Amino acid sequence: MKILCVFGRHNYGDPARGLSPEYAAFVPTLKRLGHEVHHFESWGRHGYSDLAELNACLLAEVERLRPEVMLTVQMHYELWLETLEIIRARGDVATISWTTDDSWKYREVSRFIGSAYNAMTTTYDYVIPKYHADGIHEVLLTQWAASADCFAEPLPANKCRYPVTFIGSAHGDRRALVAQLAAHGIEVTCFGYGWPAGPLASEDVPAIMRESVISLNFANSKGENQIKARTFEVAGAGGFLLTNPAQGLERFYAPGSEIAVYQDFDDLVSKIRYYLSHPNERDRVARAGYARTLRDHTYEQRLVEVIDFALAAKNRAGSIQPGRSFDQALRSHRVTPALRMLRVMLVGAGKICFGPQRGSRAARRLLFELSWRLAGRQTFTAAGWPGRLFPYD
Protein backbone atom coordinates (compact mmCIF):
# COMPACT_ATOMS: atom_id res chain seq x y z
CA MET A 1 0.00 0.00 0.00
CA LYS A 2 1.23 3.52 -0.79
CA ILE A 3 1.28 5.79 2.27
CA LEU A 4 2.12 9.49 2.35
CA CYS A 5 3.45 10.70 5.73
CA VAL A 6 2.97 14.44 6.24
CA PHE A 7 4.91 15.78 9.23
CA GLY A 8 8.37 16.99 10.20
CA ARG A 9 11.56 15.04 9.79
CA HIS A 10 13.04 17.01 12.69
CA ASN A 11 11.62 18.22 15.99
CA TYR A 12 9.78 21.51 15.41
CA GLY A 13 11.19 21.51 11.88
CA ASP A 14 14.67 22.31 13.22
CA PRO A 15 17.54 19.94 12.30
CA ALA A 16 19.46 21.10 15.39
CA ARG A 17 16.81 19.39 17.56
CA GLY A 18 17.29 15.96 16.00
CA LEU A 19 14.79 13.61 14.34
CA SER A 20 11.19 13.95 15.40
CA PRO A 21 9.76 10.92 17.25
CA GLU A 22 7.03 10.65 14.62
CA TYR A 23 9.49 10.41 11.74
CA ALA A 24 11.85 8.09 13.60
CA ALA A 25 9.01 5.72 14.52
CA PHE A 26 6.36 5.88 11.79
CA VAL A 27 8.41 5.86 8.60
CA PRO A 28 10.58 2.78 9.31
CA THR A 29 7.68 0.90 10.91
CA LEU A 30 5.42 1.39 7.91
CA LYS A 31 8.25 0.23 5.65
CA ARG A 32 8.73 -2.89 7.78
CA LEU A 33 5.02 -3.57 7.39
CA GLY A 34 5.61 -3.74 3.64
CA HIS A 35 4.14 -0.38 2.59
CA GLU A 36 5.57 2.01 0.03
CA VAL A 37 6.22 5.06 2.22
CA HIS A 38 6.73 8.64 1.06
CA HIS A 39 7.48 11.57 3.35
CA PHE A 40 6.30 15.14 2.81
CA GLU A 41 8.00 17.78 4.96
CA SER A 42 5.37 20.03 6.53
CA TRP A 43 7.23 21.49 9.52
CA GLY A 44 10.47 22.68 7.91
CA ARG A 45 11.00 26.42 7.89
CA HIS A 46 13.16 26.65 4.77
CA GLY A 47 11.50 24.39 2.23
CA TYR A 48 8.74 26.78 1.15
CA SER A 49 8.41 30.52 0.80
CA ASP A 50 5.07 30.52 2.63
CA LEU A 51 2.16 28.27 3.55
CA ALA A 52 0.53 28.81 0.16
CA GLU A 53 3.50 27.11 -1.48
CA LEU A 54 3.52 24.34 1.12
CA ASN A 55 -0.15 23.54 0.58
CA ALA A 56 0.13 23.74 -3.20
CA CYS A 57 3.08 21.34 -3.10
CA LEU A 58 1.15 18.92 -0.91
CA LEU A 59 -1.77 18.85 -3.35
CA ALA A 60 0.66 18.28 -6.22
CA GLU A 61 2.35 15.45 -4.32
CA VAL A 62 -0.97 13.74 -3.63
CA GLU A 63 -1.88 14.01 -7.30
CA ARG A 64 1.52 12.63 -8.33
CA LEU A 65 1.66 9.73 -5.87
CA ARG A 66 -2.04 8.90 -5.51
CA PRO A 67 -1.51 7.31 -2.09
CA GLU A 68 -4.12 5.09 -0.49
CA VAL A 69 -3.48 6.68 2.93
CA MET A 70 -2.25 10.08 4.07
CA LEU A 71 -1.04 10.13 7.69
CA THR A 72 -0.36 13.58 9.14
CA VAL A 73 0.88 15.09 12.38
CA GLN A 74 -0.10 18.76 12.55
CA MET A 75 1.74 21.32 14.64
CA HIS A 76 -1.01 23.90 14.27
CA TYR A 77 -2.19 25.76 11.12
CA GLU A 78 0.41 24.71 8.51
CA LEU A 79 -2.07 22.48 6.62
CA TRP A 80 -5.09 24.45 5.50
CA LEU A 81 -8.55 23.04 6.05
CA GLU A 82 -9.25 23.74 2.38
CA THR A 83 -6.29 21.57 1.37
CA LEU A 84 -7.34 18.71 3.65
CA GLU A 85 -10.93 18.86 2.42
CA ILE A 86 -9.83 18.79 -1.23
CA ILE A 87 -7.71 15.70 -0.59
CA ARG A 88 -10.47 13.99 1.36
CA ALA A 89 -12.99 14.79 -1.39
CA ARG A 90 -10.89 12.95 -3.97
CA GLY A 91 -12.28 9.72 -2.55
CA ASP A 92 -9.14 7.70 -3.23
CA VAL A 93 -7.09 8.80 -0.19
CA ALA A 94 -7.90 7.86 3.40
CA THR A 95 -6.78 10.80 5.54
CA ILE A 96 -5.97 10.44 9.22
CA SER A 97 -4.16 12.66 11.71
CA TRP A 98 -2.10 11.43 14.65
CA THR A 99 -2.54 13.94 17.48
CA THR A 100 0.26 14.42 19.98
CA ASP A 101 -0.99 16.46 22.94
CA ASP A 102 -4.77 16.34 23.07
CA SER A 103 -4.74 16.92 26.84
CA TRP A 104 -4.34 20.60 25.95
CA LYS A 105 -4.12 20.68 22.15
CA TYR A 106 -7.67 19.42 21.57
CA ARG A 107 -9.02 22.80 22.66
CA GLU A 108 -6.52 24.75 20.55
CA VAL A 109 -6.17 22.64 17.40
CA SER A 110 -7.76 19.19 17.12
CA ARG A 111 -11.41 20.22 17.46
CA PHE A 112 -10.99 22.68 14.58
CA ILE A 113 -9.20 20.37 12.14
CA GLY A 114 -10.86 17.03 12.96
CA SER A 115 -13.82 17.36 10.58
CA ALA A 116 -11.45 17.90 7.63
CA TYR A 117 -10.06 14.36 7.95
CA ASN A 118 -11.63 10.97 7.40
CA ALA A 119 -10.38 10.02 10.87
CA MET A 120 -8.45 11.28 13.88
CA THR A 121 -6.43 9.53 16.55
CA THR A 122 -5.96 10.49 20.19
CA THR A 123 -3.98 9.06 23.08
CA TYR A 124 -6.42 10.41 25.70
CA ASP A 125 -9.58 8.42 26.37
CA TYR A 126 -11.29 11.30 28.18
CA VAL A 127 -11.03 13.49 25.05
CA ILE A 128 -13.09 11.17 22.84
CA PRO A 129 -16.45 12.44 24.19
CA LYS A 130 -15.30 15.97 23.34
CA TYR A 131 -14.66 14.92 19.73
CA HIS A 132 -18.10 13.33 19.55
CA ALA A 133 -19.77 16.39 21.08
CA ASP A 134 -18.13 18.51 18.37
CA GLY A 135 -19.45 16.22 15.63
CA ILE A 136 -16.17 14.37 15.00
CA HIS A 137 -17.07 10.69 15.30
CA GLU A 138 -14.27 8.81 13.54
CA VAL A 139 -11.76 8.89 16.40
CA LEU A 140 -9.36 6.05 17.25
CA LEU A 141 -7.97 5.70 20.76
CA THR A 142 -4.33 4.69 20.39
CA GLN A 143 -1.03 5.25 22.19
CA TRP A 144 2.67 5.79 21.65
CA ALA A 145 4.87 2.70 21.46
CA ALA A 146 8.41 1.43 20.87
CA SER A 147 10.15 0.76 17.56
CA ALA A 148 11.12 -2.82 16.78
CA ASP A 149 14.48 -1.77 15.39
CA CYS A 150 15.42 -0.45 18.85
CA PHE A 151 14.55 -3.59 20.84
CA ALA A 152 17.40 -5.07 22.88
CA GLU A 153 17.58 -7.40 25.87
CA PRO A 154 18.19 -5.48 29.11
CA LEU A 155 21.74 -5.25 30.42
CA PRO A 156 22.41 -6.14 34.07
CA ALA A 157 22.97 -3.05 36.20
CA ASN A 158 26.61 -3.98 36.79
CA LYS A 159 27.29 -3.80 33.03
CA CYS A 160 25.67 -0.39 32.50
CA ARG A 161 27.79 2.59 31.52
CA TYR A 162 25.72 5.34 33.17
CA PRO A 163 24.16 5.40 36.66
CA VAL A 164 21.33 7.89 35.88
CA THR A 165 20.45 9.57 32.57
CA PHE A 166 17.79 11.80 31.11
CA ILE A 167 17.15 12.24 27.37
CA GLY A 168 14.97 15.16 26.37
CA SER A 169 14.91 18.92 25.88
CA ALA A 170 15.94 21.20 28.74
CA HIS A 171 12.63 23.03 28.90
CA GLY A 172 10.25 23.83 31.74
CA ASP A 173 11.54 22.99 35.21
CA ARG A 174 13.87 20.22 34.05
CA ARG A 175 17.08 22.18 34.57
CA ALA A 176 16.05 23.05 38.12
CA LEU A 177 15.05 19.44 38.83
CA VAL A 178 18.39 18.08 37.62
CA ALA A 179 20.20 20.74 39.67
CA GLN A 180 18.19 19.73 42.75
CA LEU A 181 19.19 16.11 42.24
CA ALA A 182 22.83 17.16 41.98
CA ALA A 183 22.49 19.03 45.27
CA HIS A 184 21.35 15.72 46.82
CA GLY A 185 24.41 13.95 45.47
CA ILE A 186 22.71 12.42 42.41
CA GLU A 187 24.39 13.30 39.14
CA VAL A 188 22.20 12.94 36.06
CA THR A 189 23.83 12.73 32.63
CA CYS A 190 21.53 14.68 30.31
CA PHE A 191 21.24 14.58 26.54
CA GLY A 192 19.01 16.73 24.35
CA TYR A 193 18.36 20.21 23.05
CA GLY A 194 19.44 22.81 25.60
CA TRP A 195 21.80 20.58 27.61
CA PRO A 196 25.59 21.00 27.36
CA ALA A 197 25.93 17.58 25.66
CA GLY A 198 23.36 18.60 23.03
CA PRO A 199 20.92 16.29 21.22
CA LEU A 200 21.77 12.71 20.35
CA ALA A 201 21.57 11.17 16.92
CA SER A 202 18.39 9.08 16.88
CA GLU A 203 20.36 5.88 16.35
CA ASP A 204 22.33 6.53 19.57
CA VAL A 205 19.32 7.01 21.86
CA PRO A 206 18.43 3.32 22.44
CA ALA A 207 21.99 2.44 23.45
CA ILE A 208 22.09 5.23 26.05
CA MET A 209 18.81 4.04 27.55
CA ARG A 210 19.96 0.42 27.62
CA GLU A 211 23.33 1.31 29.15
CA SER A 212 21.79 3.36 31.98
CA VAL A 213 21.02 1.81 35.35
CA ILE A 214 18.14 4.30 35.57
CA SER A 215 16.54 6.29 32.73
CA LEU A 216 14.49 9.21 34.02
CA ASN A 217 11.36 10.47 32.32
CA PHE A 218 9.93 13.90 33.12
CA ALA A 219 6.56 13.72 31.36
CA ASN A 220 5.37 17.25 32.06
CA SER A 221 3.49 19.40 29.55
CA LYS A 222 1.34 22.49 30.23
CA GLY A 223 0.60 21.49 33.80
CA GLU A 224 -0.33 17.84 33.15
CA ASN A 225 1.91 14.79 33.10
CA GLN A 226 1.56 12.87 29.86
CA ILE A 227 2.24 9.41 28.52
CA LYS A 228 4.61 10.01 25.64
CA ALA A 229 6.85 7.91 23.41
CA ARG A 230 9.75 7.87 25.87
CA THR A 231 7.68 5.76 28.29
CA PHE A 232 7.69 2.89 25.82
CA GLU A 233 11.06 3.54 24.22
CA VAL A 234 13.06 3.07 27.43
CA ALA A 235 11.51 -0.29 28.23
CA GLY A 236 11.71 -1.43 24.61
CA ALA A 237 15.40 -0.56 24.41
CA GLY A 238 16.11 -2.74 27.45
CA GLY A 239 16.32 0.15 29.91
CA PHE A 240 14.91 0.73 33.37
CA LEU A 241 12.32 3.51 33.44
CA LEU A 242 11.73 5.80 36.42
CA THR A 243 8.97 8.24 35.53
CA ASN A 244 6.54 10.62 37.17
CA PRO A 245 2.89 9.49 37.18
CA ALA A 246 0.49 10.15 34.32
CA GLN A 247 -3.21 9.47 33.97
CA GLY A 248 -3.83 5.94 32.67
CA LEU A 249 -0.19 4.85 32.89
CA GLU A 250 -1.12 1.72 34.81
CA ARG A 251 -3.07 0.45 31.77
CA PHE A 252 0.22 0.04 29.92
CA TYR A 253 2.77 -0.91 32.60
CA ALA A 254 2.49 -2.17 36.17
CA PRO A 255 4.22 0.39 38.44
CA GLY A 256 6.80 -1.28 40.64
CA SER A 257 6.82 -4.42 38.53
CA GLU A 258 7.47 -3.31 34.91
CA ILE A 259 8.51 0.31 35.45
CA ALA A 260 9.11 2.52 38.49
CA VAL A 261 7.03 5.62 39.24
CA TYR A 262 7.85 8.47 41.63
CA GLN A 263 5.26 10.76 43.20
CA ASP A 264 7.27 13.83 44.21
CA PHE A 265 10.86 15.03 44.49
CA ASP A 266 11.57 13.26 47.78
CA ASP A 267 10.20 10.04 46.32
CA LEU A 268 12.33 10.55 43.21
CA VAL A 269 15.48 10.83 45.31
CA SER A 270 14.46 7.81 47.39
CA LYS A 271 13.74 5.60 44.38
CA ILE A 272 16.94 6.55 42.58
CA ARG A 273 18.96 5.62 45.64
CA TYR A 274 16.96 2.43 46.17
CA TYR A 275 17.37 1.05 42.66
CA LEU A 276 21.03 2.06 42.43
CA SER A 277 21.67 0.06 45.61
CA HIS A 278 19.38 -2.87 44.67
CA PRO A 279 20.61 -3.92 41.22
CA ASN A 280 18.85 -7.29 41.26
CA GLU A 281 15.48 -5.60 41.81
CA ARG A 282 16.30 -3.08 39.12
CA ASP A 283 17.18 -5.88 36.68
CA ARG A 284 13.96 -7.76 37.41
CA VAL A 285 11.83 -4.68 36.65
CA ALA A 286 13.78 -3.92 33.46
CA ARG A 287 13.28 -7.47 32.16
CA ALA A 288 9.54 -7.37 32.92
CA GLY A 289 9.12 -3.97 31.23
CA TYR A 290 10.96 -5.21 28.16
CA ALA A 291 8.75 -8.31 27.90
CA ARG A 292 5.57 -6.23 28.26
CA THR A 293 6.69 -3.84 25.54
CA LEU A 294 7.38 -6.61 23.05
CA ARG A 295 4.03 -8.18 23.80
CA ASP A 296 1.75 -5.13 23.82
CA HIS A 297 3.46 -1.91 22.79
CA THR A 298 5.07 -2.02 19.35
CA TYR A 299 4.52 0.50 16.58
CA GLU A 300 3.70 -2.39 14.26
CA GLN A 301 0.64 -3.11 16.39
CA ARG A 302 -0.34 0.55 16.65
CA LEU A 303 0.05 1.49 12.98
CA VAL A 304 -1.72 -1.56 11.59
CA GLU A 305 -4.74 -0.44 13.61
CA VAL A 306 -4.34 3.21 12.54
CA ILE A 307 -4.18 2.40 8.83
CA ASP A 308 -7.09 -0.05 9.00
CA PHE A 309 -9.17 2.53 10.89
CA ALA A 310 -8.41 5.23 8.32
CA LEU A 311 -9.44 3.02 5.41
CA ALA A 312 -12.65 1.94 7.13
CA ALA A 313 -13.52 5.54 8.01
CA LYS A 314 -13.03 6.62 4.39
CA ASN A 315 -15.34 3.87 3.20
CA ARG A 316 -17.98 4.89 5.72
CA ALA A 317 -17.78 8.55 4.73
CA GLY A 318 -19.08 8.26 1.18
CA SER A 319 -18.89 11.16 -1.26
CA ILE A 320 -17.90 14.58 0.14
CA GLN A 321 -17.47 17.92 -1.63
CA PRO A 322 -14.87 20.49 -0.53
CA GLY A 323 -16.16 23.81 0.71
CA ARG A 324 -13.86 25.94 -1.48
CA SER A 325 -11.49 25.49 -4.38
CA PHE A 326 -7.78 25.94 -3.88
CA ASP A 327 -7.80 29.07 -6.05
CA GLN A 328 -10.39 30.60 -3.73
CA ALA A 329 -8.21 29.65 -0.76
CA LEU A 330 -5.17 31.28 -2.36
CA ARG A 331 -7.04 34.54 -2.92
CA SER A 332 -7.97 34.70 0.76
CA HIS A 333 -4.35 34.15 1.82
CA ARG A 334 -3.11 37.49 0.46
CA VAL A 335 -1.21 39.63 2.97
CA THR A 336 -2.56 43.19 2.82
CA PRO A 337 -0.63 46.34 3.82
CA ALA A 338 -2.74 46.53 6.99
CA LEU A 339 -1.72 42.99 7.96
CA ARG A 340 1.94 43.78 7.27
CA MET A 341 1.66 46.75 9.60
CA LEU A 342 0.03 44.54 12.23
CA ARG A 343 2.96 42.12 12.00
CA VAL A 344 5.47 44.96 12.44
CA MET A 345 3.62 46.14 15.54
CA LEU A 346 3.31 42.68 17.07
CA VAL A 347 6.93 41.74 16.45
CA GLY A 348 8.11 45.09 17.77
CA ALA A 349 6.15 44.60 20.98
CA GLY A 350 7.41 41.03 21.25
CA LYS A 351 11.04 42.12 20.96
CA ILE A 352 10.55 44.77 23.61
CA CYS A 353 9.03 42.25 26.03
CA PHE A 354 11.02 39.10 25.19
CA GLY A 355 14.17 40.26 23.39
CA PRO A 356 15.27 40.17 19.74
CA GLN A 357 15.65 36.38 19.59
CA ARG A 358 12.25 35.47 21.00
CA GLY A 359 10.23 38.49 19.91
CA SER A 360 8.86 37.11 16.62
CA ARG A 361 7.88 33.78 18.15
CA ALA A 362 6.18 35.50 21.08
CA ALA A 363 4.21 37.69 18.65
CA ARG A 364 3.11 34.65 16.66
CA ARG A 365 2.05 32.86 19.82
CA LEU A 366 0.01 35.85 21.00
CA LEU A 367 -1.78 36.14 17.65
CA PHE A 368 -2.45 32.39 17.54
CA GLU A 369 -3.85 32.39 21.08
CA LEU A 370 -6.19 35.25 20.24
CA SER A 371 -7.16 33.76 16.88
CA TRP A 372 -8.27 30.29 17.96
CA ARG A 373 -10.27 31.83 20.78
CA LEU A 374 -11.95 34.53 18.69
CA ALA A 375 -11.91 33.22 15.10
CA GLY A 376 -12.02 29.51 15.89
CA ARG A 377 -11.94 27.29 12.83
CA GLN A 378 -10.96 30.12 10.47
CA THR A 379 -7.52 30.18 12.15
CA PHE A 380 -6.72 26.94 10.30
CA THR A 381 -7.88 28.10 6.88
CA ALA A 382 -5.95 29.99 4.21
CA ALA A 383 -7.57 33.18 5.49
CA GLY A 384 -6.30 32.71 9.04
CA TRP A 385 -4.22 35.62 10.26
CA PRO A 386 -1.52 33.57 12.07
CA GLY A 387 -0.67 31.63 8.92
CA ARG A 388 -0.67 34.74 6.76
CA LEU A 389 1.56 36.74 9.12
CA PHE A 390 3.69 34.06 10.80
CA PRO A 391 4.05 31.03 8.53
CA TYR A 392 7.31 29.78 10.05
CA ASP A 393 8.02 31.82 13.19
Image (cartoon, rainbow, N blue to C red):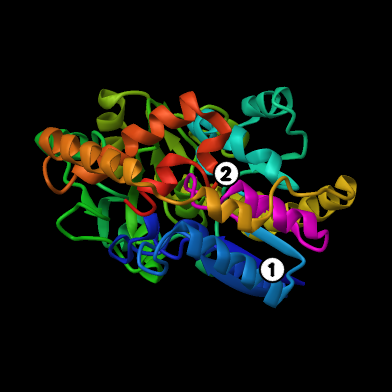
Write down the region rendered in magenta.
72-97
From the image, tell me which residue sits under label 1: 3
Residue 284 among those drawn in magenta: no
Q: For the residue labelled by badge 2, is the local secondary structure a helix, a strand or a loop?
A: loop
Residue at image coords 51%, 29%: 375
Q: Quadrant of residue 158?
A: bottom left
Q: For the residue labelled by badge 1, is the local secondary structure a helix, a strand or a loop?
A: strand
Residue 280 in sight here: no
Q: Position of residue 144 (x, y in %)?
A: 57, 48
Q: Amino acid at mark 2?
A: Thr
Residue 78 among those drawn in magenta: yes
Left or right for 94, reference 370 = right
Residue at image coords 78%, 54%: 89
How far apart are the alpha carbons under marks 2 and 1? 18 Å
Quarter in which the N terminus is drawn: bottom right
Q: Is residue 267 depicted above or below 153 in this figure?
A: above
Residue 321 in sight here: yes
Left or right for 193, reference 259 = left
Q: Amino acid at mark 1?
A: Ile
Q: Which one is in front, 228 or 41?
A: 41
Q: Is residue 14 depicted above or below 164 in this figure?
A: below
Residue at image coords 57%, 29%: 248
From the image, tell me which residue sits under label 2: 99
Q: Is residue 31 depicted above or below 330 in this figure?
A: below
Residue at image coords 21%, 34%: 177
